[in-house]
Amino acid sequence: EVQLVESGGALVQPGGSLRLSCAASGFTFSNHWMHWVRQGPGKGLVWVSRIDADGSSTDYADSVKGRFTISRDNARTTLYLQMNSLRVEDTAVYYCARERVGMPDYWGQGTQVTVSS
Amino acid sequence: DIQMTQSPSTLSASVGDRVPITCRASQNISTWLAWHQQKPGKAPKLLIYKASTLETGVPSRFSGSGSGTEFTLTISSLQPDDFATYYCQQYNSYLYTFGQGTKVEIK
């Protein structure tokens, strides 16, 4: 069974940093591109970042470019999102998602990030 | 970026009703469209991909149609478990974009 379990969400002050993790199991992690998608309070889904299967290629939404870094450890089957210079508008539930034939097919349960003073 | 627009934003329906949800893309995305279901406090769940292909394990009362810029998700006979929010999502571009969601409520 495919499982994606996010962790690392917390309450942080504006300007602070946080690292999210997504532990994957039930599939060959190193064969799949992975994504982060976020959902602000009462809002819709917004794509954040993606990484290719071996970690050599990454892409970011303009809103997080230069502040967030996606990475992965295929030996630990874990995806990461390093978030720096956090802003109030980054407040959201962050989901990791597995990509299959170009689209997200499995999602984690999400981890809450709250940026507030 | 490709903009996705869903209608309606909210829909009130009864068990057994046929429910159509429309999604429009701001440019041609061929059939690179997925539909996801989300229940409160839960992760999204993939229902349909490539506009009309049912994901394994998804009930056959769900169906998808369309290509280019106009798409429809149809629930043929609404069941109690189907009250949720539905999102369309384009993957023609790696910059995934989602519709704003359609909340299906009990009438």
Image (spheres, coloured by chain):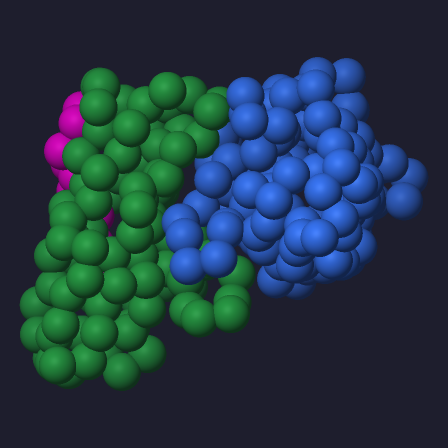
Chain colours: A blue, B green
- Range of the magenta residues? B62-71
Tell me if residue A6 comes above or below residue B33 in the rendering.
Answer: below
Along the horizontal axis of the image, is B55 left or right of A11? left
Residue A72 or residue A12, whichever sits in front: A12
User: In the image as oriented, which residue stretches furthest toward the right?
Assistant: A75
Q: Tell me the quarter of the picture where residue A48 sits.
A: top right
**Residue A26 visible in the picture:** no
The residue furthest front is: A117
Direction left: furthest residue: B18
Q: Nearer the viewer, residue B23 or A27?
A: B23
Query: With B36 as the anchor, is B61 left or right in this view?
Result: left
Identify the residue shown where x is 19% and y is 80%: B106
Give x and y (percent) for residue A63: 55, 27
Question: Where's the N terminus of chain B, which quadrant?
Answer: top left
Secondary structure predominantly adopted by residues drawn in magenta: strand
The reply to whether the magenta stretch includes residue A99 is: no
The residue that appears at 72% across and 42% down in the rendered structure is A14
> How far from the left and from the top, in percent, is residue B107?
12, 81
Q: Quick check: can you spot residue A21?
A: yes
Above-or-below relation of B18 to B97: below
Q: Nearer the viewer, residue A32 or A17?
A: A17
The reply, left or right, for residue A113 in relation to residue B88 is: right
**Residue drawn 41% across the image and 52% down it:** A43
> How many discs appear?
0
State yes or no: residue B63 in magenta: yes
| Quarter occupied by residue B81 | bottom left
